[in-house]
Amino acid sequence: MSKKLVAYFSASGTTARVAKNLASAAGADIYEIRPAVPYTRADLNWMDKQSRSSVEMRDKNSRPALADTNANIAAYDTIFIGFPIWWYIAPTIINTFLEAYDFSGKIIVLFATSGGSGFGKAVQSLQPSAPNAQIIAGEILNGNPNEKKLKAFADKY
């Protein structure tokens, strides 16, 4: 049985709720991916082309700084990484997280929350940040998925 970690970034709390429930259902450890500078409501205004999130997502090389890099990635075989879908991909802070650690030989299973879009090109946009890991597009976990659904999802990997 592999040791599992649920790592997540949540700007509004939606992904955090799903991540905590997934970790509980999977018997996994949990780690929050936190930006060094937290996002404000204005930063997340996708309708404002000058908002922080809009500027970051337009720049494929944007790497928002992390609040810490103390996740013990080496201790895990499978890492579930959760995030909200922004512009049909993962927020660039997920690239920052992947580039901060050695994921060689790890299985990374993505999960996301979304207001309506799927994973889009999330795997393709993240793979260069963890070139020696296997990245799998898991599932969009919107709403409040029950423990049975989350356990079934986690048990696939």
Image: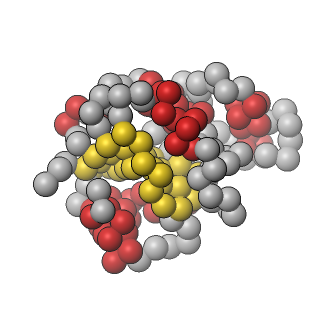
With 128 as the anchor, is 21 left or right in this view?
left
- Is residue 89 visible to the viewer in this orientation of the structure? yes
Exactly how many numbered labels are in the figure?
0
Give the residue displayed 67% in from the left and 59% down from the top: 117
Give the residue displayed 78% in from the left and 46% down from the top: 45
Q: Which of the two residues, 125 or 70, is positioned nearer the viewer here?
A: 125
Tell me: residue 87, above or below residue 156: above
Colour convention: secondary structure
With 94 as the anchor, is 45 left or right in this view?
right
Q: Which of the two residues, 150 or 104, is positioned nearer the viewer here?
A: 104
The x and y percentages for residue 2 are: 17, 50
Give the residue displayed 84% in from the left and 33% down from the top: 50
The x and y percentages for residue 93 are: 55, 33
Tell me: residue 86, above or below residue 111: above
Give the residue displayed 29% in from the left and 56% down from the top: 157
Tell me: residue 85, above or below residue 155: above
- Is residue 13 visible to the viewer in this orientation of the structure? no
The x and y percentages for residue 145 are: 46, 73
Examine the image and state in which quarter residue 150 appears: bottom left
The x and y percentages for residue 12 are: 61, 53
The residue lying furthest to the left in this view is: 1
Q: Quadrant of the N terminus?
A: bottom left
